[in-house]
Image (tube, coloured by chain):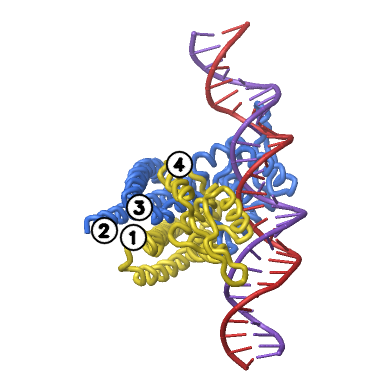
Chain colours: A blue, B yellow, C purple, D red
Amino acid sequence: MSLSHALLGLLSVHPRSGYELTKAFERDLGRYAWQAGHTSIYPELNRMAEAGLVEVTHEGARGARTYDVTPAGREELRTWLLTPPKQAKVRNEQVLRMFLLSALEPADALVVLHRIAEATDQGVTDLRKVREEHAEAPVTGADGFGQLAAEFGLRQYEAVRDWARWAIERLEREQGA
Amino acid sequence: MSLSHALLGLLSVHPRSGYELTKAFERDLGRYAWQAGHTSIYPELNRMAEAGLVEVTHEGARGARTYDVTPAGREELRTWLLTPPKQAKVRNEQVLRMFLLSALEPADALVVLHRIAEATDQGVTDLRKVREEHAEAPVTGADGFGQLAAEFGLRQYEAVRDWARWAIERLEREQGA
DNA sequence: CCGATACATGTCAATAGTGACATGTCGTGT
DNA sequence: ACACGACATGTCACTATTGACATGTATCGG
């Protein structure tokens, strides 16, 4: 399952509690890559601890347990990342909507496209800020996500925005003709 | 559920059998937007027929049933597409792998990045062909998918490829330093 | 005519994931 | 003192999804 690998990845950057992991999913990971709520994260952490992939290294206030990756977990993550996925699972409602746009009448499609263009434009603006904040950190290691991920998200947004504008122009040209 | 809307979208382009829908998922939709196998498609079609969103318009050889969208189904699809999703569900294993790249040692990360760059480069080449084949068709209507979707996939691949190259360069520069 | 292959649909058990509900703690402001 | 919000973890019923298994039919090449 991918969720366990996502958790291993986050923990290998630095140890965290389930609660903090949940927030990480809400913030970055869940937006672009893989969403999960605390109701799947906590049970999964327990399963992984039992399997020896992670371990509790510290118990803090309010019953908080800090998890860290074990050597076995690190090896599992590395193997997974280095193993080529024949056909990775994709499930993106946003992209689905774009595919289905062709089913709408041009006037309706234009409404949706304009909304997409605006939303992605906002996303680009937001991520530019994030990128600047992390500009000097090294790409791998403790702050890696702020780098590779932000840049990835940024380029993703730009691509969608440009596509939406292209589609708008094409549709308007067709309607005019 | 998104699967039903995906089916409505495909059927609204032109009527098809469950088998043909399954192939459509294997070919385009499932690659970029929403994957589903025949074991979820057939039961879903039956549910949707019962709900009056689709209907069987023709029975062919080998028990094949051609489904078409009803007016109610068309309205449902339109409403869904025009209703803004606050926070669409995302689950993309490929993107997850990219996020987790930071957890690898630079040498390992470079191996993966090179593989991504190659694979997406191939994807770009393939989709350019698709785009040229459909260059004259109108953007909405019967052949819409070949247009908006191909262009979207193309730009998506290009963005990932360029990102991978950017990441490779950054990593190599860091390692050299 | 026979065998392979693509066509075509289905069930069912197991797994994964969501949303509603439940419980308790610590710190901060009033 | 106390209320409130963020912290922190959990269960459980329900729904969605997958993979294994099952079944039968046209078509095409040899």
For marks 3 and 2, the one nearer the N-term is 3
Report the chain holding disc 2: A
Q: Are marks 2 and 1 in contact (CB under 8 Å)?
A: yes
SS class of the residue under badge 1? loop
Q: Which circle, 1 or 3, is nearer the viewer? A: 3
Q: Is residue B102 visible to the viewer in this orientation of the structure? A: no
Q: Quadrant of residue B158?
A: bottom left
Q: Count neighbours of disc 3 (C-alpha within 10 A) and say few if under 14, some if 14 to 19, many if 20 or more.
A: few
Q: Do dots 1 and 3 share one subunit?
A: no
The chain carrying label 3 is A
- Circle 4 sits on which residue? B85
User: Disc 4 to disc 2, how far (Cα)?
Assistant: 28 Å
First in sequence: mark 1 or mark 4? Answer: 4
Q: Tell if the residue under mark 3 belongs to the same chain as the one under mark 4.
A: no
Quick one: A28 or B28, which is closer to the camera?
B28
Q: Amino acid at mark 4?
A: Pro
Which residue position holds label 2?
A174
Q: Chain of mark 1?
A: B
Q: The residue under label 3 is which amino acid type? A: Glu
Q: What chain is tagged by disc 4?
A: B
Which residue bears the numbered disc 1? Answer: B139
Q: Nearer the viewer, mark 4 or mark 2?
A: 2
Give, as a three-letter code, the residue at label 1: Val
Q: Is residue A172 left or right of residue B169?
A: left
